[in-house]
Image (tube, grey):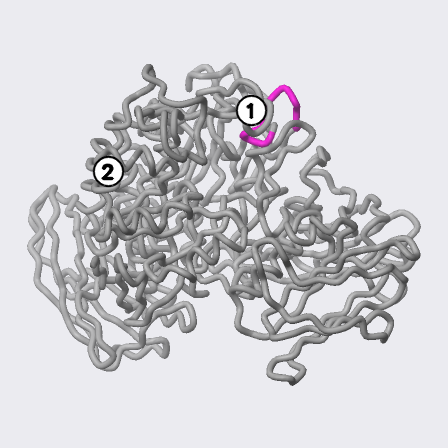
Amino acid sequence: MIMFRRYLCGFFPLLIFIVLSMPAQAQHQGMALFNEDWQFAKADNMTEYEEAMSSITSWRSISLPHDWSVEGPFSPELASGTGFLPGGIGWYKKSFTMEEYDPSRQYTIYFDGVYKNSEVWINGHHLGKRPNGFLAFYYDLTPYLKAGDNQLVVKADHREYADSRYYTGSGIYRNVYLLSKAKQHIQPWGVFFTSPDVTSTRADIQVQVAIQNEAAQTSPVQVVAKLLDANGHTVGEQTVESFLPAGNYNQETLSFSIMDPMLWSPDDPYLYDLEVSIHKNGEQIDFWQDKVGLRTFRFDAQEGFFLNGENTLLKGVCIHHDAGALGAAVPEAVWAQRLATLKKLGCNAIRMSHYPHQDYLYDLCDEMGFLVQDEAFDEWEVGKNKWIEGWNVGTPGNDGSYDAFAEWGRQDVKDMVLRSRNHPSIIMWSVGNEIDYPNDPYSHPVLDEGRNPQIYGKGYQKDNPAASRLGELASGLVSAVKAVDNTRPVTAALAGVTMSNHTSYPGALDIVGYNYQEYRYEEDHKAYPNRVIYGSENGDALSAWKAVTDHPYIASQFLWTAFDFLGEARPWPERSSGAGIIDLAGYPKPDYYFRKSLWNESPMVYLAMTDKEENLHRRRGMEGIWQGEQGEKLWVACYANVDEVELFLNGESLGKKEIVYDDKDMPGWMVEYAPGELQAIGYQNGSEVASYTVQTPGDLDHMKVSIEEGEEDPLNGEKILIMDICLADQNGNRVPHSDQEVDIELEGGAVLLGLESGDRSSHENYKSSSRKTYNGRLKAYIKVPNGADKVQVVVSSNGLQSVNREFN
């Protein structure tokens, strides 16, 4: 049994660490979002700083985050793995004036992620290079910053555009922050909140604080840690004296207890505020604030996963970081909407595949209640196959991130943990995904025998790297994680369990993830009774879920995937994966409702139609639209979590069906099509508890437009509008098969970030102000800058009345 009881949190986790002075909204003190007034140039032939700064004449103004790859164009000459989108070299520069420059303070530039091989200069001085494109990093600007005018330059080198099995994006595609702090300050990522012992009546708290002294003199300071409840009342605190060596650092541990703690869980994601401050001579000189959560959890080799003492199934999904038209530069409000869709599903866990994601996404998981597996790598020291012509088609490439692993691997995984270890949502750290994919690249003689559902090539490949290397590398990565956090288990997602079982790889891990290896659960549990096994990546078959519910020692299913995503595409013209139960635009597919019937306890009924009975049983090619030819035989599948469902066509009962799922037989009716209304009534214990109605759509009549306003960003005052456009008949029913182009016009300073239809084969320009609907729908993402007044959105389409919306 492995027990992990300490826990953490996160609201702007890694940035606030450096927050400075104090007053109101102290979590933002000393931290400024540095996203505006940048200039960008794509210059694939400019590799050197001096050459680029002297030769590039065509710069364009942009705001960050910015992903240049998603600007396209799509091309079949590029790589299916990364969505047939370009890479190259991008240069960014920002000129800024330090009107309140203070030479007695420290200044830090913080990047949440730059893809990839980034290099940074300030006023011509090279600050450093970071190969990994998914990790946060920062540099000290102090030695080179000056009063008055300054210039920051960033280079991102993504010439190896086919370097991934999925879409990465290119450039400064996450937030950038400028931080100012006193000479004596909390180190970046220098606060570590844990709760070593938690019960329903008492919680013991420890707060480790690393304090840096950049001054030339030893300094005595006071360190204060304070925990506040959701009402702002202090529930525990401690103050300690600390002596900071000149030019060095000191670490203090503050401990206190609180009574009657509120425990964090997906059903009740209660968060406390943790405040840490540094005082010198009675004056507060540094301040850090974050959200934290209290809870206990453990993985058990026989009984699965326990949260706060309760046995809990992890109903999880895997996600990538892009959102269709937005590429990898996705605003927080968009992910907030996406997570809300997952919450309605009944999902309670998310796997951040296969790299650390945007900083705010972990905050949202804390606040909304999702358990998280954070993951570091998709490859280690040797490159994997990267598909060029289509998934598993043709000859793969082998560009990738592996060439930096020897130098940066342990530092990368350590920084992933340091950045996010204060999040209560995170319950495990993964050091790799499918590193042991058989023959891609590691191999072992056992591949000549046994069952290997995932394998590249045939049998043992003696010229490939030996699988024994996996355990050696994993041990080093696990040690790097535990050096900075021993409160969570370390794991990896294994694809070649047959092979890895003949190595030390599984034994190097605390818990072992199985990708698509449900058939091995029983035999491996018997062979390795002390091994914690969980499903780390799984298909959507009913049998894959039953493998969890039928075996108490299996804690989870992480469905591949929640959302369609750019890249990992089939051959051209497809440029996106269709693996999601939700499409690129965030609209649920019929299979979303099948999953909801398994994961959500609230009574529900849903109907999906097909013209082939085999589709009904395999849940493929289903549509949620009632239309066809008069008298045509259509199969109607029912996804429900009730006892039985009665189906009505235009008020006439077609009989009741008991809702029993089987691997090869889903509940459904064969119905002769007639236009009108199809209705399902769900019964539990004989009482009506749920219903669902779908109507045949008529002729296209108008556009329905609805807009969701995201919360205003507290750092820059921006707001994101998410607009849904639906082609409708006169009764408001969606018209799915009369797609046409829609135009968006904006006034008042708003910016159109992108239009997404969900069509995986569309090659329309993502940055255009017009796009064709897909299945009658289109989504628009609009940014409203701080200070914009009377923003007007005009939606028009040929032959339909325009729709105007105004926002103050």
Q: Is residue 82 magenta?
A: yes
Could you tell me which secondary element the residue under label 1 belongs to?
Answer: strand
**Residue 492's x, y, as percent?**
32, 43
Q: Could you tell me which residue is drawn at 33 percent across and 24 percent down?
A: 443
Cα separation between marks 2 and 1: 36 Å
Q: Which residue is mark 2?
A: 477
**Residue 721's x, y, as percent?**
64, 57
Upstream in sequence: badge 2 or badge 1: 1
Image quadrant in which you'd find residue 624: bottom right
Image quadrant in which you'd find residue 639: bottom right
Image quadrant in which you'd find residue 608: bottom right
Task: Using residue 689 as the reference point, say whether residue 741 is left or right of it.
Answer: right
The amino acid beneath tag 1 is: Lys
Could you tell me which secondary element the residue under label 2 belongs to?
Answer: helix
In the rendered image, the vertical position of residue 505 relative to residue 642, given as above or below? above
- Main secondary structure along the magenta-highlighted residues: loop
Q: Nearer the viewer, residue 722 or 29?
A: 722
Instruction: Tell me if label 2 and label 1 are in contact, CB under 8 Å.
Output: no
Residue 180 in sight here: no
The image's mark for residue 191 is none
The amino acid beneath tag 2 is: Leu
Q: Could you tell me which residue is drawn at 39 percent across and 32 percent down?
A: 437
Task: Using residue 524 as the reference point, say whether residue 675 is left or right of it.
Answer: right
Q: Which residue is mark 1?
A: 42
In the rendered image, the vertical position of residue 206 relative to residue 727, given as above or below? below
**Residue 672's x, y, as percent?**
86, 60
Q: Quadrant of the C terminus?
A: bottom right
**Nearer mark to the viewer, of 2 and 1:** 2
Q: Could you tell me which residue is drawn at 88 percent across and 54 percent down?
A: 632
**Residue 204's x, y, as percent?**
17, 71
Mark 1: give few (<14), some (14-19) or many (20+) Cα within 10 Å. Answer: some
